[in-house]
Image (cartoon, rainbow, N blue to C red):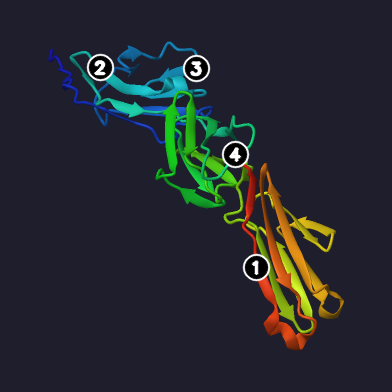
Amino acid sequence: METSEISITILSAPVLDSNSSFVTGGNVTLQCDAGNQDVTAYTFYRDQTPICSEPHVTCRGSSLDFTPISESDSGSYTCTIQNPVSSSTSQPVQWTVSAPISLVMLSSKTSGTLWAGQDSVSLHCSAQGSAISFSWSLDGKPLSSNPPYNITQSDSPPESTLTISPLSKNDTGPFTCTASNLVNSETSNELNLSLNWYPEDSIACSTQFIDDMIQLECSWPGGQPEANVTMIFNNIEETGQNEVTRNVSLGQSPGRSNLTCVGKHLGKSFSCTLIFAIPQSAKDKKNAICKKKKQEKAGSKP
């Protein structure tokens, strides 16, 4: 009687692969591809530890199913195939399970008055998700980490900080941050800063002839918020923001008078006085005499 012999070959390394996206909450299948080799057993490992006994994992021959997969399933995976005469293990594959980004929040702990050119501020952006990268924008335009802007990021917890030192007049906002990963991206709420700054120059007193009128002007523009300006002429006071103007008829004006301007802005005050002789007719404009008194300053920046 003849005896037939069954030939069992030495196994070569399989290939571990997946056609699924590694996103939390999804069902993912890993496939241990041994080709046409004679395989009697498959074993799957994560970080060199058998994984088939975990409650959300099902091993079905050459397949490993996660129902569902979670961030804790990230790691280095291998599969081992066996037959009666040999075993072989795949090359390790590192898989990271990504969590979709959510709850992107932009905030600042700053309170009180901020002064452009003097103060600094830090804005904080937080998000939920995994493998997050952050980007920043000011009024819809991207910001990079160049002075006066400094951007830092931490991974645990996912957070990015934008520090502005010093603040400028252009830093009122709106600021936003965007969190991104391989799954999605999400943009935060808008954040605006309340900034103050003083007018760049001192208050100005001026006059000009317009036909048979003299236009008086007190101006102190450029502040945030706008400066309060008061004009005092012939014992009459008029107040406005940034500037006050008044037209005076040549025929009704006294021959000599004083124009006083007073500006007030957040604890800082300037005043100026213009002494001039008003001509009695438009033909006599060239004889108008104007002399500006030295400006007086009161108060200081806080």
Query: Which badge, 3 or 1, comes first in the chain's sequence?
Result: 3
Of residues 189 and 251, the one nearer the viewer is 251
Query: Which badge, 3 or 4, comes first in the chain's sequence?
Result: 3
Q: Which image quadrant: the C terminus?
A: top right
The residue where tag 1 is placed is 291
Query: Which badge, 2 or 1, comes first in the chain's sequence?
Result: 2
Determine the residue positioned at 51% across, 23% down.
67
Closer to viewer: mark 3 or mark 4: 4
Q: Are marks 2 and 1 in contact (CB under 8 Å)?
A: no
Q: Are marks 1 and 4 in contact (CB under 8 Å)?
A: no
Determine the residue positioned at 51% across, 30% down.
129
Position of 236 relative to 33 (above/below): below
In the displayed structure image, the side of residue 100 where residue 211 appears, left or right? right
Closer to viewer: mark 3 or mark 1: 1
> Where, by quadrant of the figure, is residue 11 drawn?
top left
Amino acid type, callout 2: Gln
Residue 116 locus on image (x, y percent): 55, 45
> Where, by quadrant of the figure, is residue 45 drawn?
top left
Closer to viewer: mark 4 or mark 2: 4
The residue where tag 2 is placed is 82
Amino acid type, callout 4: Leu
Residue 56, which numbered label?
Answer: 3
Determine the residue positioned at 81% across, 79% down.
250
Closer to viewer: mark 2 or mark 3: 3
Mark 1 residue element? strand
